[in-house]
Amino acid sequence: MTPDRLDRFARHIVLPEVGGAGQAKLVQSHVVLVGMGGIGSPALQYLAGAGIGRLTMIDDDKVSASNLQRQTIFKTSDIGWSKAEVAAEWLTAFDDEIDFVAHAVRLTRDNAADLIAGADVVLDGSDNFATRLAVSDACVAAGIPLTSAALGRFQGQVASFAGHRAGHACYRCFVGDAFDAEDCDSCADTGVLGAMVGMVGAFGAMAALRVLLEGVSTLGDPQWGLVHVLDGLKPALRSMRIAKDPECSACGIVSSGA
Ligand SMILES: [Zn+2]
C-alpha cells in the first residue's frame, strides 16, 4: 500500500483485531453486493470505507423518491436513474482506487452464478425470498461464503453462511423451501424506518468483514450459521445457531462428502 492508502486506513491498521495483515486482506478482497437499497447503501459505504479492493453492485431497480428516506447513497437528483449505476458513481467519487462492476440487472437463478463469480463473500441485502434463495444456492454451488442481512419492520437478521462446507448450514437450511416462488415481504406494504435499516446494513457489512478476515486477524471469526436477530425497538439482540439440514436441497448433498 502507498503512504496515502496507509494513512487512509490507519484506524483499521492500529486495531489489533484487524491490523496490517487484515487491512492488506481487505484491499485484496472482492465483495458482491446484491441489492443497492436500504441495506446495500450503508453496506457499500462501510465496505468502500474499509478499502475492499473490488466491489460488484447488483440492482435492477431505479431510484425513487420514497427510497431517499433510508437509501443513503442516493440524492434527489438521482431519482429515475439506475441504482447500480448511481452506486458506482457514488463509489468513484468516494474512492477512485476501488475496482468495481455495476450490474443493472435482476439477479435470478439463471444469472446468479455469473454475477457472483470470483467473490470472496456475497453480501445479500435483497428484499425478497426468491432472490435470497437464488443467491444462497449459487453461493453454495460456487463455494462462496454468504452474508445475509434482512429486515422486517423493527426486526433485523444478520448471519454468515458457509453451506458449501461440511457441517455448516446454508441460508436455505435456515428458511427452508417455502418461499421459493414468490416475493413475501415488501417495504411498501409494511413500512420501514430509515435508521433501523441502516443499523442492519452496517451490521451486515461488519459480518462480511469478519468473513474476509477469517484466518488473517482476530476479527475474522465468521460465526457461520449464527443468526443475529436485532430487535430495534427495545433494542435487544439475540443469536441462534442454525444447524445444517441434511435434507437441504442446496447444501445437503453437495457437502456431505466434503
Ligand atoms: Zn442448506
Image: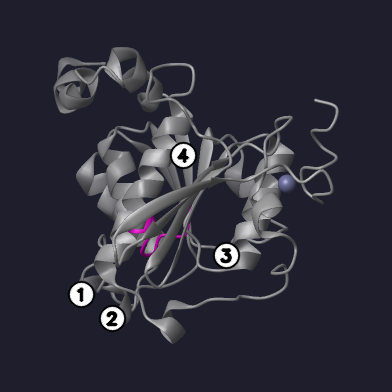
Up the image or down, 29 lies above or below 81; here it is above
Ranked by sequence position, the earlier of labels 1 and 2 is 2
Tell whether label 2 touches label 1 (CB within 8 Å).
yes
Ranked by sequence position, the earlier of labels 4 and 2 is 4
- Going 33% across and 36% down the picture, which residue do you hit? 98
Disc 3 designates what residue? 106
- Going 15% across and 22% down the picture, which residue do you hit? 4
Task: Measuring from the top left, give residue 91's x and y in whole percent.
Answer: 29, 47
Q: Marks 1 and 4: which is nearer the front?
A: 4
Disc 1 designates what residue? 76
Instruction: Count how many numbered circles sit on residues in the image.
Output: 4
Label 1: which secondary element: helix
Q: Is residue 35 magenta?
A: yes
Is residue 71 visible in this depiction of the protein?
Answer: no
Up the image or down, 250 lies above or below 150; here it is above
| Crowd around label 3: few <14 · some 14–19 · many ≥20 (10 Å) | some
Which quadrant of the figure has residue 183? bottom right
| Crowd around label 4: few <14 · some 14–19 · many ≥20 (10 Å) | many
Judging depth in this view, the residue of 217 and 114 nearest the camera is 217
Look at label 1 and name its amino acid: Thr
Q: Which residues are magenta?
A: 34-41
Mark 1 and mark 2: span between their CA atoms? 7 Å
Label 4: which secondary element: strand
Q: Residue furthest bottom?
A: 189
Task: Measuring from the top left, give residue 231's x and y in whole percent.
Answer: 37, 62
Look at label 3 and name its amino acid: Arg
Look at label 2 and name its amino acid: Ala
Q: Which mark is residue 63?
A: none
Up the image or down, 195 lies above or below 254; here it is below
Q: Which mark is residue 65?
A: 2
